[in-house]
Image (cartoon, rainbow, N blue to C red):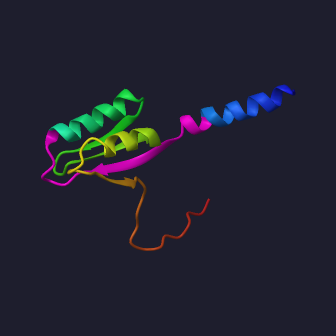
Amino acid sequence: MKPTSVLFPLFGLVASASAQRQVLVTYSQDTPLSIVEKAKEAVLATGGIITEDYSLIKSFAATVSSEVLETINALSSSHKPIVEDDKVVTIQQQEPLEQ
């Protein structure tokens, strides 16, 4: 057996396990703060990073793995979060910058 045939599958497992996404996690206003706090704790416990914590709405931005999103979603059956990719949104088409 060639060493590369063992290493490449292992590399694939490591890459997929550590894949991170930038997301916005938003809860409805009637969600108890304890659920939002548990979601933030789950992000931090799995090596994620909370990049923004919003105070006017029950929401935060984070860099997380897909696995922690499943955990966050399972925290409450009656207060499910809305999870969206965190990306730049524009209202008009922008011309590329000249270099």
Q: Residue at x 82, y 30 (%)?
A: 4
**Residue 69 vertical placement versus 10 (above, below):** below
Does the image show residue 65? no
Q: Depth check: give the residue in front, 69 or 22.
A: 69
Q: Is residue 49 left or right of residue 40?
A: right
Which stretch appears magenta? 15-33
Does the image show residue 20? yes
Q: Residue at x 34, y 37 (%)?
A: 50
For the C terminus, the quadrant is bottom right
Q: Residue at x 74, y 34 (%)?
A: 8
Q: Is residue 73 left or right of residue 2?
A: left
Query: Residue 97: within the magenta?
Result: no
Q: Position of residue 17 (x, y in %)?
A: 55, 35
Q: How many marks?
A: 0
Q: Position of residue 16 (x, y in %)?
A: 58, 39
Q: Position of residue 12 (x, y in %)?
A: 66, 37
Q: Position of residue 67 (x, y in %)?
A: 44, 39
Residue sitting at the far front: 77
Residue sitting at the far right: 1
* Displayed quadrant of residue 5: top right
Q: Depth check: give the residue in front, 76 or 44.
A: 76
Q: Residue at x 22, y 41 (%)?
A: 36
Query: Residue 18: within the magenta?
Result: yes
